[in-house]
Amino acid sequence: MIRLFSGDGPRSTILALILIVIGLALAFAPFLFPGVRALETAARICIFVVLAASYDLLLGYTGIVSFAHTMFFGLGAYGVALASTHMGRGFTALGVGTLAGLAAAVALALVIGLFSLRVRAIFFAMITLAVASAVTVLASQLSAVTGGEDGLVYQIPRALGPAMRLDREIAGVTITGKILNYYVVFAISLVLFLLMLRIVNSPFGRVLQAIRENDFRAEAIGYRVVRYRVTATCLSAGFAALAGSLWAIWLRYVGPGTTLSFEIMLDILLMVVIGGMGTIWGAALGATLMVLAQSYLQNLMALAAGATEALPILSRLLDPDRWLLWLGVLFILSVYFFPTGIVGRLRARAAR
Amino acid sequence: MSEPILKLEGIETDIGRYHILSGVDLEMPRGQVTMLLGRNGVGKTTTLRSVIGHWRAKSGRILFDGQDITRMPTPAIARMGLGFVPEDMGIFSDLTVEENMTLAAASGPLSPKRRDRIFAAFPPLATFWRAPAGTLSGGQKQMLSIARAMAEERRLYLIDEPTKGLAPAIVSTMAAALRELKREGASILLVEQNFAVARALGDRAAVMEGGRIVWTGAMAELATDAKLQSRLLGLSVEGV
Amino acid sequence: MSVQSEGAPAHRPTFAALSARDKLAKSAPFLLLPVLALVGLALIGTWPTWLTLTVSGLAMGMMIFVMASGLTLVFGLMDVINFGHGAFISVGAFVGISVLAGLGDWTGAASLALNIGAVLAAVIAAMAVTGALGWGFERVLVRPVYGAHLRQILVTVGGLIVIEQMIHVVWGPDEIFLTRPEMLKGVTLFAGAAVETYRLLAVVVGLVLFVAMRMVLRRTKIGLIVRAGVQNGEMVEALGYRLRLVFVGTFVAGSALAGLGGVMWGLYQEVITAGMGEEMMILVFVVVIIGGLGSVEGAFIGALLVGLLQNYVAFLAPKLALVSNIGLMTAILMWRPEGMLPVVRAK
């Protein structure tokens, strides 16, 4: 087991228990939580765990802030969408789209990395923000190719669609293509997650952390800091693109709002910060919490806003559309008061 | 004997994770030139930076003219009358020589009398008065750096290696200017690797080793005792 | 060796004249502007169209410069990168436009004096609010994270979101459309081309601000401290200046200028949204990066380049207008990786 985790276990009993619960819940989601909504949520969690972990590869392990992570995510998603639209439904289209998206993301990350990390790491945040916003604009403007604001709706292989039904029931649940699709998403997410855990615990990952702690010293010891940073950027972009492809396979729809938006970028940031920067496990925990909160807490806000209708300002503050306001506050507070996130806290507690 | 102009008591300073000063004790008599000597990396620069407040001493006390300045912000220390010439000279290279000097005179415009005195000590500064300081040569930058410290009446000068990497002719200009300061009765704490200059200027000497001061005494005593020199500074005796 | 006590120094001063090549390297960024304008003229072909586009490009550039100047100085002085700067643009616009709406009698009258008075009132209110907001922002959010870029970026992004959302809470979720004051509507005939009056005004205001800012930076002691502080803050403190105060002052002034930029931009677009600051930040970042972080002159040239290029490209190939800025940034960074006029830092 520990080898599967590349020697980097949760290192805290409470954390281990939480993660086991999350893992089991995701593994048996179609049987434990019947209903379309629950399955949507579970798939979303799987994909965002990968996405957040890939972002943590950069933010937590390399100490670089990027605002282009949704762009890479989007490239993977649009790759699958475009391939499925133009090549027709089929597994070939999914494969070609995924590979094309992956290649595009890595290439773009390489170019951005070479341009901005060569001079100053701080350029990276600004340049990725500028490039990502330009790509978002482009995606909605080039509507002939990307479907513009409406995005693209396409078909995926029949075996993965909701219309396909096996004649068999398992534990009282009819197995549909949707459930098979979920297990594709789950299995690939799990593999990608373990792969990232392996990367950060490899010698390469340790060099990244040394650079994060003190880049001058790492350079002095003889590590080519820029090369390591650029490599981390490319890796992170690649994993994000793969998560995007999974997302596209699951949703059967791709649009700027579901892949490229700045709001998703903020979600990812929050997942990583709340879960704990620099711990891949933290990304998993943060993503799970955030997706659950988004799916169920916003309803609660609507209720609260309705209940406080008499108090104009308060009810406006509690409006579900002001979800981001609270995220922002939470975000600032966690950067100040929980810089190591939930995982850091739990591990510190276990170490005591 | 009057109160020392500067007194350090058990100063310890860390830089990041590195422990640089481990208990520096020093008393600097008023109106004299105290040489701070020692091999590279023993903590001379860190001592100066701890006094001005660029690095914060983690423990110990720094008394400037009897007043405790250990926790004072750098600008307040400077305004008490402390002129600082850092090792890297701290020249504002995009500003002209004139602008550098204007800034150095923090409490008011540079008086013409002082300006003339500075020009007399460092003629190139007059020539390049309106040129960007970045275009000056290394020696001229060092002149500007010391001239800035001289822009106002100071109670104490902290000067870090003013002759580092300079041609002999410029070293003598620098030494002449410092000697002029000394003649006026200034108190100077001077870090210097050039032993000839140190011997010519210093009244007293303090030698550092491994983050503390291991020897204090009259400069003349150190200058005449070759064995002491080689023990404390690792200097070869020839040429002295 | 002997140490002389008297006499002239033995070395001969030589004037450190800049070689022709160095001079060209220094002024090359300034030459980019006329070059871009001429290329634009050649491609666009007709004089009036070109002039109209150039004036609107300059107007846009001036407004971006107003927004960017504070950001670049704050970075230069304290090495603080404020991703929340855009929030001040939005807040400035909403405050300013609210004041204008309240002064409907003045803006509706066909009197230049009343119109300008209303705009001035709006600008003053916007700058006061954003200046105060900047002061609080620095104190609450930025101060605890000095020297930590990663946390600075995260915290200021958080601040941006919160302020933007608070605009929604106070002013409602929808964009607000507005009309310019009577006398600022319409066009002025200028050198054979019809140019929107407001754009001319924006160019003049931007130019005046740039000149004033340069005067302050060159001729006053505060300006000297700021310029010196950008290069070596530690030394400025060692000379006895409280750089912190100067920094807070710069932060407040920069925030107020962002507020002014917000009002100007709102009047230019005739619509304001809570997200406008965030959108403008993209251009602001491009401008400070290509100008060279910390350089006011660099930001000025950068802003004008961005404004002109965007307007020319919008005419020649509309779909590429926004991407053109990324292209410009790429080209400039290939030429000068630190930006056009990078500030020489001591460390």
Image (spheres, coloured by chain):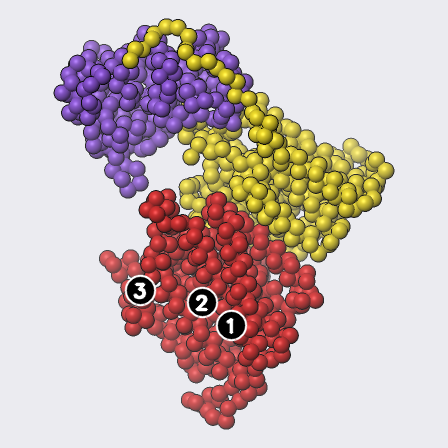
Q: Position of residue B158 (x, y in %)?
A: 33, 21
Q: Position of residue C310 (x, y in %)?
A: 69, 47
Is residue B3 toward the left or the right of residue C90 in the image? left
Residue A8 numbered mark, or none? 3
Residue A341 numbered mark, or none? none
Q: What is the drawing colour of chain C? A: yellow
- Which chain is displayed in red in the rendered image? A
Q: What is the drawing colour of chain B? A: purple
Of all chains, the one bearing label 1 is A
Tell me where residue A321 sits by quadrant. bottom right
Question: What residue does disc 1 label?
Answer: A246
Is residue C272 toward the left or the right of residue A214 in the image? right
Task: Give the secondary structure at mark 2.
Answer: helix
Give the residue type at disc 2: Val
Task: Give the secondary structure at mark 1.
Answer: helix
Q: Residue at x 22, y 17 (%)?
A: B239
Q: Quadrant of the C terminus of chain C?
A: top left
Tell me where residue C112 sits by quadrant. top right
* Residue C133 showing in the rendered view: no
Of all chains, the one bearing label 2 is A
Question: What residue does disc 2 label?
Answer: A50
Give yes or no for contact between labels 2 and 1 (Cβ–Cβ under 8 Å). yes
Q: Residue at x 68, y 60 (%)?
A: A141
Is residue C223 toward the left or the right of residue C28 in the image? left
Work out whether C36 lies above or below C274.
Answer: above
Give the residue type at disc 1: Leu
Give the residue type at disc 3: Asp
Of all chains, the one bearing label 3 is A
Spatial CA distance of label 3 from label 1 is 26 Å
